[in-house]
Image (cartoon, helix red, strand yellow):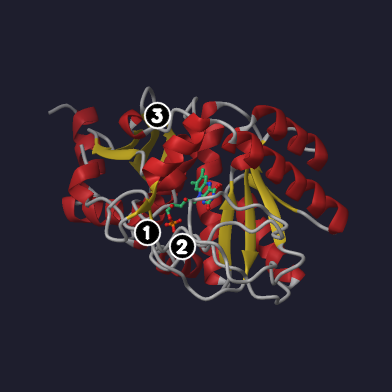
Amino acid sequence: MDLAEEVAMTAVNMWSEATFVAAVGDAVWAPSIHNSQPWRFRRTSDGIDVLVDRRRGLPVCDPDGRAARVSCGAAAYNLRLALAVAGAPAAWTAGTGDALVHLVPGSRRPATPLERSLHRQILRRHTNRSPFADVRVEPGIMVQLAEAAGDEGGWLHLVDGVPALETVALLTRKADAQLRADPAYVAELRQWTLVADDDVQGIGRHACGAAPHDAELMTRRDFGGPAQEVTRDPTPHPVIAVLGFHGEYRVHDVQSGMVLQRVLLRAADLGLASAMYSQPVEVPAVREQLRLALHRAYAPQLVLRFGYAPTTCYTNRRPVEDVID
Ligand SMILES: Cc1cc2nc3c(=O)[nH]c(=O)nc-3n(C[C@H](O)[C@H](O)[C@H](O)COP(=O)(O)O)c2cc1C
């Protein structure tokens, strides 16, 4: 064995098989578009690859795989967090081909208190599609979420004031109507939603939430749930933020996923519920209108809602053996 091979072996040995499998076990609890879980994980001679699983793509709502890359980025963030909490943090670079992220061992160090508390939220965080309570989210809390995005190199644009909120709501409604007018979009959505609650992929019947109501300011994606009992959104002014990255190459989609997961875990850590709206970024013309409305240099990646709400039903994940190459 030459020196380079020896260094590579030492690097990989820093992550035992048990550490690797446990970290993948955390990674899979990342959010993904329609809970499609479009990821695979592979040990390499010098580290770990996070790969996009093209067989699990959504050709209608995500034709160029952007949302799948965001989802893989979120999973890669969980993986990094899990390795850091194991005392063996990773440095990462962009991978090649289907390998979107390549992790290599960094210097051993104890996890920080923040890493530990974010890691504790991995299994608690979930997408909450129930009505949020009419309770104000303190501005200081939103600033902490924006800082969490910045810490991972991205941005979180807080949508402040009624006119700005109404613009984002209008664009979301417009995009949603445009998407729903396409029978192929509706058929794809039906494949992934209202699945049995114990299914290991897709969004289970109880996690889908009720059907969106016309009176809701922010139009949720219609997953085919039952009609709502309440006739109005109890939160007339929902707390909305738009997430993005400083760039529009494919690697920036992956990095946006890391930013997303850091923000969502931080939100959970601060006791907030969160919901996502990707309709306005799935229609290219509307995505551009949203970018212009926010005066941003780069296209937004996801619209997020934060607030207070009781825990709702969780989605499931495929077993770890199914996602390890
Ligand atoms: C890129 C991306 C886009 C998403 N878009 C939406 C959306 O438009 N509406 C929605 O309700 N959830 C959306 N989600 C949330 C997923 O449906 C959710 O993460 C998945 O079902 C797993 O559930 P969990 O987040 O509760 O773990 C999105 C997630 C990602 C990563």
Question: Distance from label 3 to label 2 (Cα)?
Answer: 28 Å
Does any atom of ligand 1 lie closer than 8 Å to the CB of label 1?
yes
Name the disc covering residue 315, or none. 1
- Residue at (54%, 50%) from the top-left corner? 222
Q: Earlier in the sequence, mark 1 or mark 2?
A: 2
| Element at label 3 | loop
Is residue 245 visible in the rendered structure shown here? no
Name the disc covering residue 95, or none. 3
Q: Which is more foreground, mark 1 or mark 2?
A: 1
Name the disc covering residue 126, or none. 2
Question: Distance from label 1 to label 2 (Cα)?
Answer: 8 Å
Name the disc covering residue 219, or none. none
Q: Are marks 3 and 2 in contact (CB under 8 Å)?
A: no
What's the residue type where badge 2 is placed?
His
Which quarter of the picture shows residue 182?
top right
Question: Distance from label 3 to label 1 (Cα)?
Answer: 29 Å
